[in-house]
Each structure stands twice: as C-alpha cells, then as structure tokens.
C-alpha cells in the first residue's frame, strides 16, 4: 500500500493568514492526489483533484501543487468557514489511501 | 445532481454481519464511467477506503478487510451494498458511500455517512 503522510497534524491560524499543508507519498503517485475538507459531523468535500485542479464551486483561495511524492495545499487567505480538517488521498493505485489529516484551528 | 444516501442498521452485535446500502439518485449507476465506493471513519480518526464496485460487478477490496468484505450492486434499484462479516468493536465507525470518477479518480459526491456501532 502507498502510505500518505500529512504535516502538520494540526495548526492554529488567524483569518487572513496564508496556510500551507503538505502531503508526502511513500512512492511516486504522479499527479493522482486529491484534497478534501471535512467539517465536524459532515462528509468530506472534494477541493482539489489531480494535484492542482480546482473542483467546481470551490473558492479560488484554495490551490494545490506538486507531483511525484510531494504535494501541497495552500489557502491564500484563510476565511472563517475554512476552519476544518483537510485530508489528502492518493488514487494512483488501489487500495486508495488517505493522509492522517490536518486540523486547521482558530488562533 | 447525483446524490448518495446510506441506509442500514445503526447497531450490530459482535460476530454478526454489518449490512449497508447506498442509494444513488440523480444519475444511473449503469451509465458507467464511475466506481462506487465505501469508505469508513473510526470515531475521531482518519479515513479508510474499504473498496469499490463497477456497474458490471467487478470489485476491488482493501486487502486489510478483503476476507470479510463483499460489495454488490443492484442496477435495477440503482443501489450498491456493503457487507462486512464477523464484526468486532473495531468496526465501529461512520460508513460513507461515494462515487469515484474512473479517469481522474476524484471522489464526489459522498453520502452523508451513517454511524454503525458494534456492541452487544
């Protein structure tokens, strides 16, 4: 199985801050990397697919980059509704695997 | 737009079989182009992919659960189902169904999730 490692596991930030979350794969996954946002009590929501493609309806302050083994999710200016847990997921091979999550909290 | 909804018992006894169904609305499972997946999330933990089925019936299961998992599809009802046998307390989780696009491999939409507790 491909292991996905996210960092940090949690962070505190203020509204307006630029936030970067990283995800590392245990082997090359090309660009088969998705990012999801999950708020308490709700299902994950797709933000970014194929490493850098923005899902329809997702604000442009979210962006993704990377290929191979190293990927980043950036929120350019954190908004109150962005406080949530973020997960990366590889779909290069089965079984699909997720990172452990990054919880973004209010400073 | 396509929507998914999980249904099934919220409480299962140890050693029994967990059974859940995902009903798809707003689109047809038979149209192809998508895998239909199950994912679970243990309380307060991360996400674990269980497996998927294609409308033709072909499946792929997570090796960590393969010996206990069966995913099936009923195209006439536009539903797919999960069975997990010999459950223990470690199978207590929120279970989600989701659609995976076959070429770009994104997961969207997801069902709202259903909590299944394994307890006597």
Image: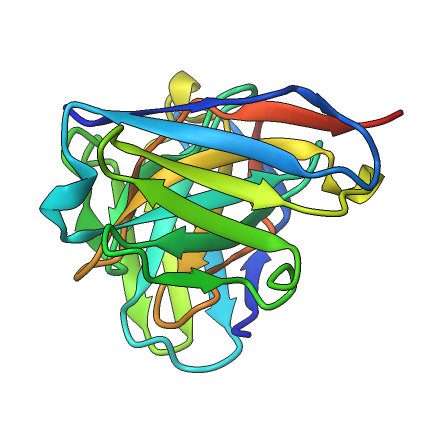
Q: Please state, as top left, top right, bottom left or bottom right, where the N terminus of chain A lies in the image.
A: bottom right
Residue occupying the point 65% across, 63% down: B67
Left or right side of A23 for A18: left
Near-viewer residue (A78 or B66): B66
Residue occupying the point 43% across, 69% down: A94
Q: Going by the picture, which residue comes out furthest to the bottom?
A: A27
Near-viewer residue (B111 or B70): B70
User: In this rendering, is residue A56 above or below B116?
Assistant: below
Residue occupying the point 71% across, 32% down: B43
Residue occupying the point 29% across, 76% down: A30
Left or right side of A60 for A28: right
Q: Please state, as top left, top right, bottom left or bottom right, where the C terminus of chain A lies in the image.
A: top right
Q: Going by the picture, which residue comes out furthest to the left?
A: B31
Residue A106 position within the rendered picture, expressed as x and y whole percent measured from the top left: 57, 23
User: In this rendering, is residue A26 above or below B59?
Assistant: below
Res A102 seen here: no
Residue B95 position within the rendered picture, expressed as x and y whole percent measured from the top left: 55, 34
Give the mark count.
0
Q: Going by the picture, which residue comes out furthest to the front?
A: B76
Residue A95 position within the rendered picture, expressed as x and y whole percent measured from the top left: 48, 66
Left or right side of B81 for A66: left
Residue B5 position within the rendered picture, expressed as x and y whole percent measured from the top left: 38, 22
Colour scheme shown: rainbow
Res A50 seen here: yes
Left or right side of A105 for B31: left
């Amino acid at each position: 199985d491909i292991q996905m490692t996210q960092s940090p596991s949690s962070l505190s930030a203020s509204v307006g801050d630029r936030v970067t979350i990283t995800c590392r794969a245990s082997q090359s996954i090309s660009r088969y990397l998705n990012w999801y946002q999950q708020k308490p009590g709700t299902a994950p929501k797709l933000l970014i697919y194929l490493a850098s493609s923005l899902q329809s309806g997702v604000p442009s302050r979210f962006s993704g980059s990377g290929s191979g083994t190293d990927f980043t999710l950036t929120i350019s200016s954190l908004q109150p509704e962005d406080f949530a847990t973020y997960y990366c997921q590889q779909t290069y091979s089965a079984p699909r695997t997720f990172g452990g999550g990054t919880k973004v909290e209010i400073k | 737009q396509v929507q998914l909804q999980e249904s099934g018992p919220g409480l299962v006894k140890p050693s029994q079989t967990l059974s859940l169904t995902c009903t798809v609305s707003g689109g047809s499972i038979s149209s192809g182009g998508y895998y239909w997946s199950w994912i679970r999330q243990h309380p307060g933990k991360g996400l674990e992919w269980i497996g998927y089925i294609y409308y033709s019936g072909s499946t792929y299961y997570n090796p960590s659960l393969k010996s206990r998992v069966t995913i099936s599809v009923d195209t006439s009802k536009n539903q797919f189902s999960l069975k997990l046998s010999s459950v223990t307390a470690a199978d207590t989780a929120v279970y989600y169904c989701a659609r995976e696009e076959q070429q770009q491999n994104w997961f969207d939409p997801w069902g709202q999730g259903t909590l299944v507790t394994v307890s006597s």
